[in-house]
């Protein structure tokens, strides 16, 4: 079975999905908010929190490009929201002190170097960097597990990144993603998980979702998703471009519990379980006499029918097979009929 290990936690089809609470930049540059979100994610039962590492001068040139979900330039947003190396170290240490996995997405080579210095257990590469092959290769050289989001990329461009990871023998997961904020449900396209499974059979699969509810993530579990990532906030009234697509603490708790339950319910075959026997005993119907039957009487619709409980010898499925037989013994009304009471 496909599997990667992140911070001692096995991730793959044999395990309950790893839910990643994407704090991202929802802290708006506030260390205190980031710590609050770690606490709230922990209290929701989440094992993994993720931030974003922005070293803006190495990440982009000054620009006035305004994202579709914002009112200001990406330069101004990231300049305001970037955490310092010390803040990221403290957040990592705090999360790990609670037994959680700390992840971050590096958006530049300098950011990746910082995270390696901090000793992260794995790397998350965002959709925008999926085809940034120089950065993918730089990260791959660390030989640590990589979770790669694939929004805005097709199978061919994802394949180039995957080939780099394979070349460095890096364990990896691929997250299907639609880079629309929010993502309309008809554009989530959970069917892409099957495309990724067929194209990359050695990949752990997951979903990074930007829709307005946890339902697509829950649905993805039944299609093989082992990692579920959604933006997270402690308070939906906080400012920030990603807040409208973020889940709160209650939704995160539901996602953790729901994904675990759905995973537990997967698999199996259509067969009768031995644990169903107590129910069989009262729920099945068996052949019974609906009138007194004397020895020599012919068994017919007039003197037998099927009734509960299911503790008799002749179950309802055998009803027609005994019609026309003769009774060898007297049978009383409401008595469950036995094979030894019938001829032939």
Image: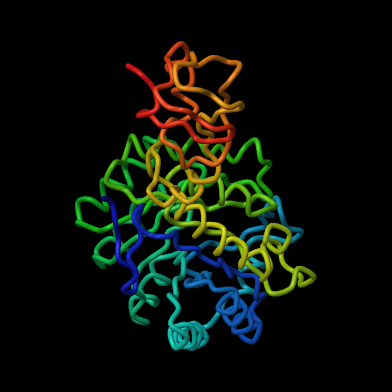
Depth order, front residue of 10/314: 314
Residue 238 in the image, given as x and y percentages of width and height: 76, 72
Q: How is the image coloured?
A: rainbow
Horizontal arrangement in the rendering, residue 113 relative to residue 222 (left or right): left
Considering only vertical position in the picture, is 286 above or below 227?
Answer: above
In the picture shown, does residue 334 fall above or below 279? above
How many numbered marks does the figure carry?
0
In this rendering, would 5 be left or right of 290? Answer: left
Find residue 270 and report its image quarter: top left
- Residue at screen point 50% across, 23% down: 294
Kindly identify the residue that appears in the image at 61 percent across and 62 percent down. 231
- On the image, the x and y values in percent for residue 183 come to 66, 45
Q: Residue at x 36, y 54 (%)?
A: 173
Compare residues 85 and 187 and report the one nearer the observer.
187
Q: Is residue 308 left or right of residue 114?
A: right
| Residue 54 at least partly seen | no
Image coords of residue 232 (percent x, y) = 63, 67
Q: Is residue 304 above or below residue 194?
A: above
Q: Position of residue 243 (x, y in %)?
A: 71, 64
State whether residue 27 appears in this view: yes
Which quadrant is the C terminus positioned in?
A: top left
Q: Residue at x 35, y 68 (%)?
A: 122
Q: Is residue 133 left or right of residue 154?
A: left
Residue extending furthest toward the right: 237
């Amino acid at each position: 079975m496909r599997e990667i290990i992140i911070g001692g936690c096995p991730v793959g089809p044999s395990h309950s999905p790893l839910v990643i609470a994407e704090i991202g930049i929802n802290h708006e540059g506030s260390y205190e908010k980031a710590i609050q979100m770690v606490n709230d994610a922990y209290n929701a039962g989440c094992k993994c929190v993720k931030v974003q590492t922005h070293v803006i001068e190495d990440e982009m040139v000054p620009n006035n490009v305004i994202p579709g979900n914002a009112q200001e330039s990406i330069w101004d947003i990231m300049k305001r929201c970037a955490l310092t190396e010390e803040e990221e170290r403290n957040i990592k240490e705090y999360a790990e002190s609670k037994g959680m996995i700390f992840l971050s997405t590096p958006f530049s080579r300098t950011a990746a170097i910082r995270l390696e210095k901090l000793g992260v257990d794995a790397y998350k590469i965002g959709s925008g960097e999926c085809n940034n092959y120089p950065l993918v290769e730089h990260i791959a050289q660390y030989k640590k597990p990589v979770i790669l989001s694939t929004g805005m990329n097709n199978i061919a461009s994802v394949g180039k990144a995957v080939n780099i990871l394979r070349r460095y023998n890096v364990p990896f997961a691929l997250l299907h993603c639609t880079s629309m904020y929010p993502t309309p449900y008809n554009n989530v396209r959970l069917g892409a998980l099957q495309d990724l499974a067929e194209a990359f059979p050695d990949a752990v699969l997951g979903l990074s979702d930007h829709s307005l509810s946890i339902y697509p993530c829950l649905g993805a579990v039944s299609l093989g998703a082992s990692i579920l990532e959604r933006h997270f906030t402690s308070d939906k009234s906080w400012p920030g471009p990603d807040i409208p697509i973020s889940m709160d603490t209650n939704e995160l708790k539901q996602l953790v519990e729901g994904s675990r339950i759905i995973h537990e319910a997967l698999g199996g075959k259509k067969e009768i379980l031995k644990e169903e026997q107590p129910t069989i005993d009262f729920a099945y119907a068996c052949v019974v006499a609906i009138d007194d039957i004397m020895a020599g009487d012919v068994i017919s619709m007039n003197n037998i029918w099927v009734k509960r409980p299911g503790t008799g010898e002749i179950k309802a499925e055998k009803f027609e097979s005994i019609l026309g037989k003769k009774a060898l013994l007297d049978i009383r009304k409401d008595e469950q009929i036995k094979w030894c009471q019938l001829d032939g």
